[in-house]
Image (spheres, rainbow, N blue to C red):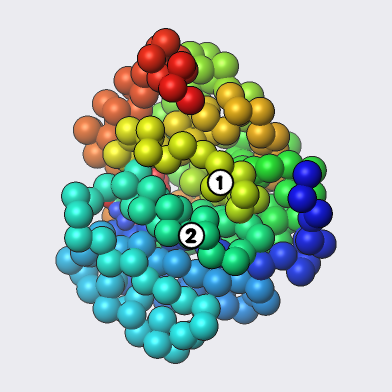
Amino acid sequence: MTPVTPAAARTALVIVPTFNERDNLPVLAAALMEQPNVSLLIVDDRSPDGTGAIADDLARRFPQRIDVLHRTERPGLGRSYLDAMQRSIHRPFDVICQMDCDLSHDPAHLPDLIAALDNADVVIGSRYIAGGGIVNWPLRRKLLSRCANIYIRTVTRLSPRDCTSGYRCWRREVLASLPFERFGSEGYSFLVEMLFVAERRGWRIAEAPITFVERRQGESKLSGTVLLESIVTPWRLVARPFRAMV
Ligand SMILES: Nc1nc2c(ncn2[C@@H]2O[C@H](COP(=O)(O)OP(=O)(O)OP(=O)(O)O)[C@@H](O)[C@H]2O)c(=O)[nH]1
Ligand SMILES: [Mg+2]
């Protein structure tokens, strides 16, 4: 194993996908810029509300630490992660993280997630382990998330309790080893697909507790198509052709 940089000294790149997050992005970026050794890559899908221009402004204010990827290809959360990760794995960071822009993922948890990489290859910010939780979600949303995790874990046998959390930190070399060209999910299922491949390849997955807070500004992008993909994906992952490929 490569020598591990002490947690506090690790350099981290945080990938943040955005679609219509004009009110949230400046708040999140300011909080991340307060943390030493943290840089930010904003991945915008041509947000109609002008989030892309706000991201450019932030990059001008922090030229060494904030970059923006303006996507012009077919939009989607999975594709945004894919593009951003493929560009990031060759950059000189110890750790590559991902988090949502809607302030559901508190940047204050980031040092704990990075520190947990001492004993793991990927760390999930988890709502469903002791110490984790959810604030301000209606019961129906809680049930949907819980059922999604039970369904995913039953079909795929994935071990983490929170397989759908988008708050994660990866050791860079681990992320770099994943076969991105074989990933097929367009939406949130990309998160499950990544974990499945990582665990199948023997990487150590750990969870650190987070308190997830429902967004206050902007709208959720959870669509019917994305939900349908989430139902099909676990079966696609365990089907022989995919397993053989990864
Ligand atoms: N680049 C890009 N970002 C997206 C897309 N869809 C969602 N996002 C971003 O992905 C993150 C998660 O999206 P949310 O709409 O908050 O979805 P969620 O957190 O699963 O659902 P909620 O609980 O309703 O908030 C946010 O930062 C969004 O702005 C997309 O198609 N492209
Ligand atoms: Mg959200």
| Mark before the other along the chain sequence, 1 or 2 | 2
Q: Position of residue 139 (x, y in %)?
A: 44, 34
Q: Is residue 93 left or right of residue 17?
A: right
Residue neighbourhood size for the residue with mark 1, other residues' Cα within 10 Å, grouped as few (<14), some (14–19), many (≥20): many
The residue under the point 54% across, 64% down is 91
Q: Is residue 212 left or right of residue 2?
A: left
What SS does tag 2 mark?
A: helix
Evaluate whether residue 129 shows in this view: no
In the image, residue 241 sits, relative to residue 93, either above or below, namely above
Query: Within the image, what quadrant is residue 162 found in?
Result: top right
Q: Amino acid at mark 2?
A: Ser
Q: Position of residue 197 (x, y in %)?
A: 52, 29
Identify the residue under disc 2. Answer: 88
Identify the image quadrant of the N terminus: top right
Q: Position of residue 87 (x, y in %)?
A: 43, 59
Identify the residue under disc 1. Answer: 175
Q: Position of residue 170 (x, y in %)?
A: 61, 49
What SS does tag 1 mark?
A: helix
The residue under the point 37% across, 18% down is 236
The answer to whether marks 1 and 2 mark residues whose Cβ atoms lie closer than 8 Å is yes
Evaluate whether residue 183 shows in this view: yes
Q: CA distance from mark 1 to mark 2?
A: 9 Å
Q: Is residue 207 left or right of residue 66?
A: right
Residue neighbourhood size for the residue with mark 2, other residues' Cα within 10 Å, grouped as few (<14), some (14–19), many (≥20): some
Q: Amino acid at mark 1?
A: Leu
Which of the two residues, 59 or 240, is positioned nearer the viewer here?
Answer: 240
Which of the two residues, 161 or 239, is positioned nearer the viewer here?
Answer: 239
